[in-house]
Image (spheres, rainbow, N blue to C red):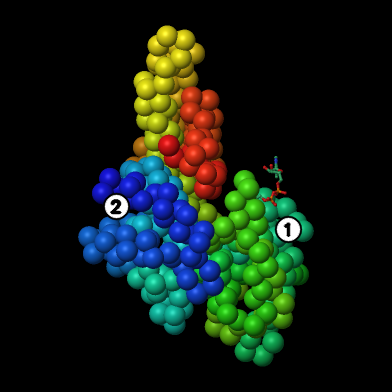
Amino acid sequence: MDEHVYPVEMEAMLALDEEVKPGVPYPEILVEIRAKAHEQGLWNLFLPDEEYGAGLTNWEYGILCEQMGRSPVVAPMAFNCAAPDTGNMEILVDHGSDEQKERFLAPLLEGRTRSCFSMTEPEVSGSDPTTLQTTAELDGEEWVINGHKWFTSGANGADFAIAMVVTDPEAPPYTRASMILVPVDTPGFDLVRNVSVMGHDGGPGHCEIRYEDCRVPAANLLGERGAGFVIAQDRLGPGRIHHCMRAIGTAERAIEMMCERANNRESFGGPLADKQFVQDFIATSRMEVDQARLLSPPRAEPRREARRGGCVGKWRRAGGRAAKRIGERRGLTRRWRPALGRPPHGVRLE
Ligand SMILES: Cc1cc2nc3c(=O)[nH]c(=O)nc-3n(C[C@H](O)[C@H](O)[C@H](O)COP(=O)(O)OP(=O)(O)OC[C@H]3O[C@@H](n4cnc5c(N)ncnc54)[C@H](O)[C@@H]3O)c2cc1C
């Protein structure tokens, strides 16, 4: 991280905006960093499966997520540990056929491609996917997909999407949906735009997609027909834990920046660090991050099987809330320097 990630953070984030486009999953600078990480075996660290990944326990990978969260845009990509590829690789390992593993999983594991996960729809509540409206109907040996998705993260520059679609509308709510692998160059897969998130719409994006008579082979069904919710839970459980641990790393870095700023900035005859209000910011931030870390699953349940935890929302909230509050306090001690231009991704780096 010290040698290859932090020094080029800003450059890499700007390059993501400038270079990523259909057919270009990573900018050149990240291709180089990723090659070094791959050479050193710092690769696919998230997969507990020893055949495909590093075979780490939840506790071990959680500590690495905290480190990667210190540079949340660049580091996970550097080590081929970025969402949504991580979740997609996990479900391809667990549910993919041999043919699907060869066509879709292998290039992701090697880092040649990126992928995206296409579930949320603008017309219905993403919190309740039993309301999904995008359909896939079997026509001979092909699925025909029709529907509208958005917030499909990373679709710009991805090789394929895993789409969650209704295949069995008459079935009970949790067995109506299935997952289908859709290469982005399939006719009828229309990437409409990158949706703006906190004012940012560059890079791999969080995309709006229309599926219009989009035909893929019947063999692109991932896992069992009607198993969409079961597979989604396999994917989202570990994904939330990873996000939670990365948020703790982001919060740790924000505390470091806040302390540095408090020591270096003078006001009213002394450094900010001497002011009681600022000391309270820092002490409260320290307590919140330590609390969030102690609540997080790698600390609470240092077992491999905890990777498929059920009640992971509270852990993610603990990490995410601590990161948000500390970021806000840090913002009060250090404003973005106009000379550096706009803050990419809304992140203050200096
Ligand atoms: C940056 C970003 C990246 C994303 N990436 C992806 C992606 O890659 N793929 C993908 O498919 N989706 C993605 N999403 C979409 C995300 O999964 C949805 O935004 C989320 O599921 C919420 O759905 P919604 O936006 O439709 O909000 P809604 O479901 O409409 O919820 C609106 C509000 O109501 C609240 N609410 C909902 N239900 C309840 C309840 N029962 N009790 C109390 N409050 C409730 C919610 O908390 C929220 O505040 C992404 C979203 C963001 C912001």
Direction bottom: furthest residue: 140
Residue 3 rendering spot, x and y as whole percentages: 26, 49
Reading the image, the residue beneath label 1 is: 122
* Crowdedness near tag 1: few (<14), some (14–19) or many (≥20) residues, C-alpha within 10 Å: few
Residue 61 rendering spot, x and y as whole percentages: 34, 49
User: In the depicted view, which residue is nearer to us: 209 or 117?
Assistant: 209
Query: Within 8 Å of ligand 1, the CB of disc 1?
Result: yes
Query: Within 8 Å of ligand 1, the CB of disc 2?
Result: no
Reading the image, the residue beneath label 2 is: 4
In the displayed structure, would residue 71 be above or below residue 42? above
How many circles with numbers are drawn on the protein?
A: 2
Q: In this view, does 272 lie to the left or right of 110?
A: right
- Residue ID at (45%, 25%): 285
In the displayed structure, would residue 122 be above or below residue 254? below
Tag 1 or tag 2, which sits nearer the N-term?
2
Specify the quadrant that holds the C terminus: top left
Residue 149 rendering spot, x and y as whole percentages: 68, 64
- Residue ID at (42%, 9%): 269
* Crowdedness near tag 2: few (<14), some (14–19) or many (≥20) residues, C-alpha within 10 Å: some
Q: What residue type is labelled 1?
A: Pro
- Residue ID at (42%, 17%): 266
Q: In this view, does 107 lie to the left or right of 311?
A: left
User: Is residue 104 among what the camera can see?
Assistant: yes
User: In the depicted view, which residue is nearer to us: 31 or 46?
Assistant: 31
Q: Residue 53 carries which label?
A: none
Q: Is residue 138 left or right of residue 28?
A: right
- Residue ID at (72%, 67%): 148
Element type at mark 2: loop
Element type at mark 1: loop
Q: Which amino acid does label 2 sit on?
A: His
User: In the depicted view, which residue is nearer to us: 83 or 170?
Assistant: 83
**Residue 297 quadrant:** top left
